[in-house]
Image: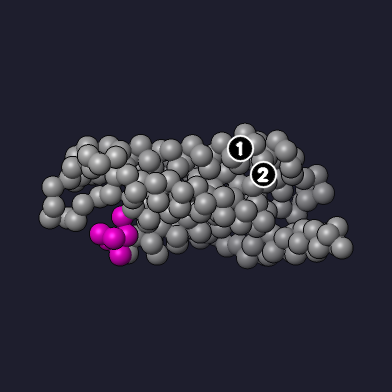
Amino acid sequence: MLKDILEAILYYDHIAWYYLNYQWHNAFLDAIMPFVRNQWFWAPLYFFLLLAMPQRYRKLGWFWCLGFFISFVISDQITASLLKPYFERLRPCNNPALTGIIHTLVPCGGLYGFPSSHAANHFSIGVFSAVTLSRHFKWVWPVAVLWALLVSYAQVYVGVHYPLDVVCGGFIGLGAGMFTGKLFNRFFPLPPTNAPAVIPTDM
């Protein structure tokens, strides 16, 4: 029974990949998706947060940057160091059965792709940002989730992941971001915009 369920999941995963990667592509997306999934493309955003958060919240801003980084490390280590070597699922771009079918736009990267570290990492830092900042900026949640979804979709589009890879990676990142975000709100809550940013003394 369990084997049948797993086979069905993998079957529909391949069907979804076939459409997302091979059928539904065009010149416009071919041009932009390699940038969307590239972490260096988003480096200005990370640099802006590194400057803006301490500027706005002083010491608490530096703690926020640390929490942002820890969220990334947790999701990256779980996916890249623990789960990928355990499951050993080949990336589609490394699967010889897909030669001649796959629409590849970037170098393949590592051998294994399940779960997606890109999806996990972007969901973890996106959700961490949303959990910690949404009390002050209501738009953070939809922007952060849409951003992480876009990066995850781009990973399938360029040929380096199956949909199941990014879905599972996204859930791992969601968990990591919620965990670190809730801890941050418990011990280092950001003050209202017009209040002084001080570190709580009753820790």
137 vs 93, left or right, is left
The answer for how far apart the CA atoms under marks 2 and 1 are is 9 Å
Amino acid under disc 2:
Gly
54 vs 72, left or right, is left
Q: What is the x, y in percent for residue 177? A: 46, 49
For residue 25, say whether it is visible. Answer: yes
Which of 18 and 174 lies nearest the eye of the viewer? 174
Q: Is residue 135 magenta?
A: yes
Q: How would you classify the magenta stretch by its main secondary structure? A: loop
What residue is rendered at 45% in x and 42% in y?
A: 71
The residue labelled by disc 1 is: 80
Above or below, 191 relative to 145: above
Q: Which residues are the magenta region?
A: 133-138
The residue labelled by disc 2 is: 113
Above or below, 122 relative to 145: above
Above or below, 89 relative to 168: above
**Crowd around label 2: few <14 · some 14–19 · many ≥20 (10 Å):** many
98 vs 79, left or right, is right
Amino acid under disc 1:
Ala
Q: What is the x, y in percent for residue 98? A: 78, 51
